[in-house]
Image (cartoon, rainbow, N blue to C red):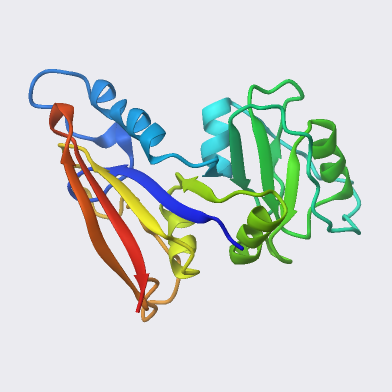
Amino acid sequence: MKPQIVVHMESTVDGRLVTTRYSQPFDGKSAEEVLDIYFQVAEQVGGEATILGRVTLQEFLSLGTFDHQGEAAAQHHATFKAPRRGKRIFIVTDPRGKVKYDKNADYDFIALLGENVSAGYLEHLRDCNVSYVFAGADGQDIAHAMEVLGSEFGFTRLRLEGGGTINGNFLKAGLLDELSLLIYPGIDGLSGISSIFEYRGQADELPASGQALELISVEKLQEGMVWLNYKFHKI
């Protein structure tokens, strides 16, 4: 059974995600001071692990990129569960197996992979105590991956902190149960900047089709931040 998945995000009033572009707070404080509220609220949102995209993780932890050149393709695609060390857990969507991990990391990791990764990469993950789950041939079967995370890893609630594309994929797959959204008191304003959900489909696709949002709570926080909580319903 898949875990409950709550997507926890922060955006401007026009729904944009690139924090370096946010307009400044009116009272002279820095944007960083206000944005820090996001991390405080994340603790209240909860979740036994945090789902991130590969790019976000590499930027956050300054991790390198694995070189698959000359490596043979993996022949076996069984789930690998590394021993947990009682650290914060990140679940990383990485279909092509790009993240190069450190052996002595301060976190536990679970990589969501495609079946086209190399055998050498799987050996690298095992050597670095990184668990992995295969999400179909191309790494895009996130519904299957979520089922494995529930049934084999025992997760009951996960917090998704993706970029717009990852969030859009989870939305399209109908995997979201809750939306925790912080509205930053500022504006981006430029067309084309990444927003909360960015499913890359055809013009006539409706990624949210069959889903409806119920507003559960609204809370005004410090520094003009507003916290909205929604529940997803299948209709």
Q: Determine the residue positioned at 88% across, 43% down.
A: 120
Percent x, y for residue 17?
A: 32, 44
Image quadrant assignment for residue 62: top right
Viewport quadrant of the N terminus = bottom right
Residue ranking furthest to the left? 26
Q: Where is residue 174 in the image (x, y as percent from the top left)?
A: 46, 69
Q: In which quarter of the image is the C terminus?
A: bottom left
Q: In this view, does 8 lie to the left or right of 79?
A: left
Question: Which image quadrant is residue 202 in?
Answer: bottom left
Picture residue at 19% right of the left edge, 50% below the top? 14
Q: In this view, does 38 lie to the left or right of 75?
A: left
Query: Residue 2: horizontal and vertical position, in percent?
Result: 58, 61
Horizontal side of residue 110 vs 36, given as left or right: right
162 vs 104: above or below: below
Give 61 or 202, whichever is nearer the viewer. 61
Say if 62 sits above or below 191 in the image. Answer: above
Residue 76: % across, % down: 89, 58
Residue at the (79%, 31%) spot, across then down: 128
Looking at the image, is 31 positioned above or below residue 138?
Answer: above
Q: In the rendered view, does 156 fall on the left or right side of 224?
A: right
Instruction: Using the image, determine if residue 90 lies above or below residue 36.
Output: below
At a point 52% along the width and 29% down the height, the residue shown is 60
Callout count: 0
**Quadrant of residue 111 in the image?**
top right
Relative to the observer, which residue lies in front, 225 or 41? 41
